[in-house]
Image: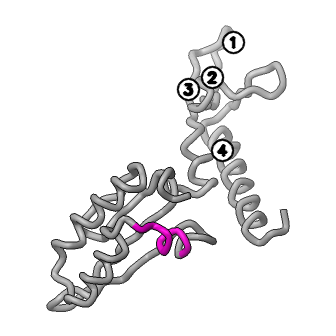
């Protein structure tokens, strides 16, 4: 149920991406939206969606891809996009990309400068079995991370398509 999850909310040009428990996130979003120069009709609809305390409709709107957008027309022209995501709003591939960092190691006994990959989640270097992964260039270590990100994106796409 949405009321126990965290949500990420944003309004283009008015509210930067903010992740909070669901009810708090919707309150922050409502406080931002109510100050926008929008029509009375849009204001009433957003109040009903964000400030009513009933999250059932929002939950149904987000069921599927976990995100919902509302384009709001601003008086005087232009628009603001209101966006609500489940969780932190990151894709699996983005989480994988944020998890790994290339680090330069000290010069070894042969005078070589090697590169490794630090896993932020575990706080340790990435290993292949019992041995830590070592790379001769920063680019090759970065390529290892890019392959993991691509694989994560591929798996996410297959999962959404129902083929995995």
Distance in Å between CA atoms under marks 3 and 4: 15 Å
Task: Return the disc, 3 or 4, that comes first in the chain's sequence.
Answer: 3
What residue is shown with label 3? 104
**Mark closer to the observer (1, 4):** 4
Mark 1 and mark 4 lie on one chain; the one further toward the N terminus is: 1
The residue at the point 64 percent across, 28 percent down is 116
Viewer-proximal residue, 24 or 114? Answer: 24
Q: Earlier in the sequence, mark 1 or mark 2?
A: 1
**Residue 137 percent location from the top left of the image:** 64, 35
Does the residue at mark 1 contact the one at mark 3 (Cβ under 8 Å)? Answer: no
Q: Which residue is mark 2?
A: 124
Answer with left or right where residue 33 lies relative to residue 121. left
Q: CA distance from mark 1 to mark 3?
A: 16 Å
In this rendering, which labeled residue sits more in front, label 2 or label 4?
2
Question: How far apart in space, not on screen, are marks 1 and 4 (Cα)?
Answer: 26 Å
Question: For the stretch drawn in magenta, what is the main secondary structure?
Answer: helix
Relative horizontal placement of residue 59, taking residue 39 as reference (left or right):
right
Q: Is residue 31 left or right of residue 109?
A: left
Which corner quadrant holds the N terminus? Answer: bottom right
Q: Position of residue 71 (x, y in %)?
A: 36, 83
Q: Is residue 59 magenta?
A: yes
Q: Which mark is residue 110?
A: 1
Which residue occupies the foreground of this view, 52 or 131? Answer: 52
Q: Which residues are magenta?
A: 54-60
Query: Element type at marker 1?
Result: loop
> Residue at (27%, 58%) from the top-left corner?
28
In the rendering, at what x and y percent does residue 151 appear? Answer: 74, 54
Labels 2, 3: front one:
2
Q: Nearer the viewer, residue 133 or 40?
A: 40
């Amino acid at each position: 149920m949405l009321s126990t999850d965290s949500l990420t909310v944003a309004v283009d040009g008015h509210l930067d991406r903010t992740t909070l428990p669901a009810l708090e996130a919707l309150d922050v979003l409502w406080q931002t939206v109510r100050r926008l120069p929008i029509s009375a009709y849009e204001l009433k609809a957003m109040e009903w969606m964000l400030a009513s305390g009933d999250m059932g409709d929002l939950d149904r709107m987000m069921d599927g891809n976990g995100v919902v957008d509302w384009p709001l027309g601003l008086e005087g022209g232009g628009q603001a996009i209101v966006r609500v995501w489940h969780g932190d709003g990151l894709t699996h591939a983005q989480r994988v990309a944020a998890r790994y960092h290339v680090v330069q190691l000290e010069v070894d006994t042969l005078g070589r400068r090697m590169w490794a990959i630090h896993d932020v989640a575990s706080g340790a270097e990435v290993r292949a079995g019992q041995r830590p992964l070592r790379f001769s260039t920063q680019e090759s270590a970065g390529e290892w991370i890019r392959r993991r990100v691509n694989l994560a994106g591929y798996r996410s796409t297959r999962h959404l398509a129902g083929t995995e």
